[in-house]
Amino acid sequence: MIGFYGEKNMKSRAEVAKKDTWNLEPLYINVDAWKKDFTELSLLAEKDWQEIATLKKEFTPDVAYIKRLIEAHFAISRKIDKLFTYVRLWLDQDITNTEAKNAYMLALAVAQGYQEAVSWIEPKILATSESFLKKCLDSDLLKEYRVFIHRLIDQKAYVLSEESEKLMSYASRLDRAPNEAFKALNNADLVFGSVEDSEGKKHPLTHGLYQVYMKSFDRTLRENTYRTLHNTFRGFENTIGELLSGELQTHLFQKKARSYPSCLEASLIGNQIPKSVYMNLLSTVEKNTSALHAYTSLRKEALDLDELHYWDMGVPLIQDVEWKFTFEEACEIVIASVAPLGKEYQEILRKGLLEDRWVDVYENKGKRSGAYSGGSYDSMPYILLNFHGTLQDLMTLSHEAGHSMHTYLSNKNQKWHEARYPIFLAEIASTVHEQLTDDYLLQITEDVDKRLYLLQSQIDGIRNTFFRQTLFATFEYKIHELVEEEEALTPLVLKTLYGELNQKYYGPSLIIDEELKSEYLRIPHFYYNFYVYQYATGIATAIFCAKKLHQGDKEAYLQLLKSGASDYPMALLKRAGIDLESTAIIENCIETFSELVKKFEKELSKIRTSR
């Protein structure tokens, strides 16, 4: 079913069947068409973005002028967005492709050059009088851009002088360096070799196959996989530690240069997310880690182990459940599961997944690891997978399809400048999809073992998306605190902190091995600037929304998806009946987790007694 793309038959990109790749032609018919657009933009860049340069010389505090300026700026930004999206997707197909890598770097240089060229716009507008800014907000001529102007005014305290903003735009070229270096190391340079199973058989190890092996019932294979992958990263702990430290230093630079209260608040203020949302998540989970301790203890008992290690945390507790899906089967399940969102929603998703080729399906040599949903306003949504046919792969498809439907609905209902919803909202739609898919599978599955397998999948879904991401968020918060206090982030400091957090979260039943203490070395999200907490708030919100959808209340949720970035995220959520400044939704997620653990334990005990 999967063999052609399985571990023994890893294909080169050129060998992958067209039907299994995403369709980039709606963006550009081919690379030559992309080069044509790139050349045109490059010529504009060589002329110092002529229209923008002219507008700079003509700057005047006049509403009609501001409209011309905003529209000229947005038009070029939109072209660059399309240009950059294509080349990023092209490169991710095979990051060893030299032509794609060169094109990516050229597109990146154009994008950065443009940011430098327009760095004067915000400080110039904000340097005008309060009365003029109010006039802009109240003007019908600028009605279409009111949200943009409002956001701009809200940032006034943190926007620097025109000359300083230009320097900041130059510095932004350096900001990507730690992340790009880590990506190159992680996706291209690191080689994990092979690992042995309990019979001495060797298996090639890749990022994608790591996830497969960690669910194997062969404990030797799991242990060897875990140790091999993490010890490979440990061999570069000084290098990766410096990359991580470099990433945090870019955050500290932004905090100091713009006089933000802290690195955390620097990442939150742009979307008006109260710091209390982040801190309440951390403190509420920390007070309720006993729920996770209970599950860890159950795992140890169910697996009948004297010692529980992290390589035992992913294996199914129900053995002999062979459950595989073709990609087409997985698509049909996901489509059926979102019935509570309506037939129109289902048909859009069906067309995207099975006709329009939104998805790049299988792992190939050089392909970026993991999964994501991407695209631009002028394209379909795109989904990168590394599909091996497991239940986890099905759930990953569901997750990324949720992102893509959010993007699709936002793009269809909002103008370009208000369509790109913030990350804070992004993880809600994806995780609602997961909840609905879990619920659907339980509904159609009669096999007792498979039902327990599904319950465990739900439990592990919350463990990984809620508890684990909150652990990451706590680690991220604490290492930023250390950097702000000018403490050195040595490998010893980092792995000690990471080990202590894992012990606190998972409790006494889990052995904290050296490899687990060093797990932070392989987490790409630590280069994303306070990104991961949004997975946790996202799943907590999604559990709440899924319950509402099952009750037939879909309109408020669909309106949220259609709203894009037409207001600040907290305001959009509150219109949908969601208040993340309260701990109630976080506590509800923890209670749901505990209920699932108790239900699983009861059903497991019942089956074992009867057999």
Image (cartoon, grey):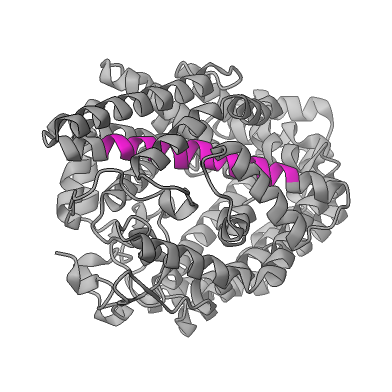
Q: Nearer the viewer, residue 450 or 163?
A: 450
On screen, residue 173 versus residue 186, left or right, reads right
Quadrant in the picture for the C terminus: top left
On screen, residue 231 versus residue 334, left or right, reads right
Is-magenta flag for residue 456? yes
Residue at 51 percent of width and 40 percent of height: 509
Q: Quadrant of residue 269?
A: top right
Residue at 44 percent of width and 55 percent of height: 311
Q: Which residues are magenta?
A: 454-478
In the displayed image of the protein, which residue is found farthest to the bottom?
98
Return the x and y of residue 127 as percentages of the image width and height: 84, 39
Residue 415 visible in this rendered orientation of the protein: no
Total labels: the figure holds 0
Is-magenta flag for residue 344? no
Is 362 placed above or below 271 here?
Answer: below
Q: Main secondary structure of the magenta part?
A: helix
Residue at 49 percent of width and 33 percent of height: 292
